[in-house]
Image (tube, grey):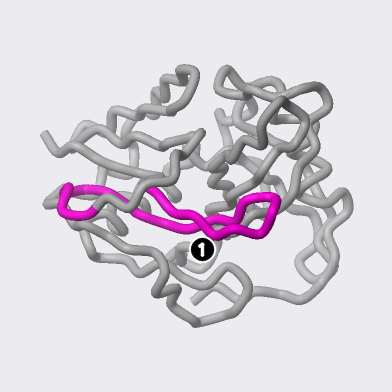
Amino acid sequence: MAIVHDTTMRPTKLELLTRWLPTRSWFEGGRPPVLAKAGGFRIDDPAGEVGIEFMFLTDSSGYEPTAYAVPMTYRGARLDGADAALIGKSEHGVLGTRWIYDATRDPVFLAQAVDLLAGRAIAQDQNASDTPDPSVRIEAIEIDTPPPAFEITPVDDDRHTEIDLGTGVLVLHRVPSPADITGLPGHVHASWTLPDGEPVSGIVLHAVAV
């Protein structure tokens, strides 16, 4: 079970993401972006070592507000071979220095994302410990967890990140679109909030088994 601490981070996640987002191929806004937290959920690491947060952001710097999906992992030490995925370092008020990574390059996140899509893991509340998030809907698919030593080779385009896991293909919707879609197997349907306070939802992650 992941413990959510009520404490500070310096720099904050939004400060780090303000610098990082404009470096992504799927970023559509101005520079610098004007970010606001718009929702999200967590996934537990069974080993209890890595924090996993699936964060939604809205950026109001462009002509129209844009929503982004940014899963992140929080680690107490640098992840070998993942420097290109490092969003930044932050000082956590309880846990000390945290290395914060784009989770699509982190094998712990990818294994748990597959387990979520297969119905073996449960989405957790973003702000409370040991509390499932019932707003996250899963249309499960039969897909195996990738082996621990698989090579991560994500491919980014202008709206998605696609990862070939060997056991299947995982697709993260970086710029999710509001849509109430059900019945399509192998997807995660979650909610976020627009800058005007309107709640919306759509597919944010899907997988195709091989």
Say whether residue 198 is magenta: yes
The residue positioned farthest toward the bottom in the image shown: 130
Q: Which residues are magenta?
A: 182-202
Residue toward you, 173 or 183: 183
Residue toward you, 143 or 188: 188
Image quarter hosting the C terminus: top left
**Left or right, 24 with reference to 191:** right
Instruction: Relative to 181, say whether 102 is above or below.
Output: above
Q: Would you name the residue on which mark 1 appears?
A: 42
Q: Residue at x 26, y 43 (%)?
A: 146
**Left or right, 195 with reference to 161:** right
Q: Residue at x 34, y 37 (%)?
A: 149
- Residue 129 horizontal/vertical position (percent): 57, 80
Instruction: Relative to 23, say whether 57 is above or below.
Output: below
User: Toward which corner of the image does residue 69 lie, by quadrant?
Assistant: top right
Q: Residue at x 71, y 25 (%)?
A: 63
Say whether residue 195 is magenta: yes
Residue toward you, 112 or 189: 189
User: Toward which corner of the image does residue 91 lie, by quadrant?
Assistant: bottom right
Instruction: Relative to 81, say whether 178 is above or below.
Output: below
**Left or right, 37 with reference to 181:** right
> Does residue 150 show up?
yes
- Residue 112 horizontal/vertical position (percent): 37, 55
**Left or right, 197 with reference to 182:** right
Instruction: Relative to 124, say whether 92 is above or below.
Output: above
Q: Residue type at mark 1: give it.
A: Arg
- Name the secondary structure under disc 1: strand
Q: How many marks?
A: 1
Q: Residue at x 54, y 55 (%)?
A: 192
> Does residue 50 show up?
no
- Residue 103 horizontal/vertical position (percent): 52, 42
Disc 1 crowd, CA 10 A, few/some/many (<14, 14-19, 20+): many
